[in-house]
């Protein structure tokens, strides 16, 4: 993963949470590491403007959206594998 150049108080904006890592653990580790440096993460594609800088329910909502992004990535990979298997 490339280095992220951000400073205390910055917010990294991504289109979707799955762009932050290859799996849920990687996304959560990155978000945690950034939060300890005082750097927030915000996703534009989500229906609510949720940021990791939010406390309480905002942070929980962010974690749930990260989980849903991981689920969608898994389902997409499974559908692609099935399509390849059926096509052969």
Image: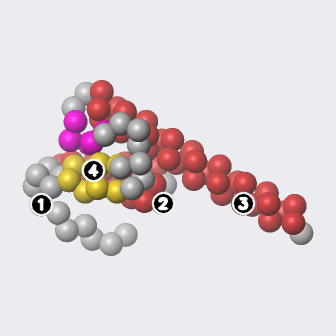
Q: Upstream in the sequence, badge 3 or badge 1? A: 1
Is 1 placed above or below 49 here? below
Q: Is residue 65 magenta?
A: no
Element carrying mark 2: loop
Residue numbers of the magenta segment:
50-54
Front-most of residues 49 and 52: 49
Query: In this rendering, does residue 77 appear at all?
Result: yes
Q: Upstream in the sequence, badge 4 or badge 3? A: 4
Q: Position of residue 8 (x, y in %)?
A: 10, 55
Residue corresponding to mark 2: 22
Q: Residue at x 79, y 57 (%)?
A: 82
Residue corresponding to mark 4: 41
| CA distance for labels 3 and 2 | 17 Å
| CA distance for labels 1 and 4 | 12 Å
Q: Position of residue 16 (x, y in %)?
A: 42, 53
Residue corresponding to mark 1: 7
Is 62 placed above or below 41 here? above
Element carrying mark 1: loop
Q: Nearer the viewer, mark 3 or mark 2?
A: 3
At label 1, counting other C-alpha atoms closer than 10 Å, the crowd grade (few under 14, some 14-19, many 20 or more) is few
| CA distance for labels 3 and 1 | 39 Å
Q: Position of residue 88 (x, y in %)?
A: 89, 69
At label 2, counting other C-alpha atoms closer than 10 Å, the crowd grade (few under 14, some 14-19, many 20 or more) is few
Q: Which mark is residue 80?
A: 3
Q: Residue at x 41, y 38 (%)?
A: 47
| CA distance for labels 4 and 3 | 30 Å
Query: In this rendering, does residue 33 appear at all?
Result: no
Q: Which mark is residue 40?
A: none
Q: Residue at x 84, y 63 (%)?
A: 85
């Amino acid at each position: 993963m490339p280095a992220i150049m951000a400073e205390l108080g910055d917010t990294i904006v991504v289109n979707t949470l799955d762009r932050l890592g290859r799996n849920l653990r990687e996304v959560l580790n990155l978000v945690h590491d950034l939060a300890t440096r005082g750097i927030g993460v915000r996703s534009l594609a989500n229906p609510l403007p949720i940021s990791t800088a939010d406390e309480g329910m905002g942070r929980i909502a962010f974690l749930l959206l990260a989980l849903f992004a991981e689920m969608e990535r898994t389902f997409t990979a499974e559908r692609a594998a099935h399509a390849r298997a059926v096509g052969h």
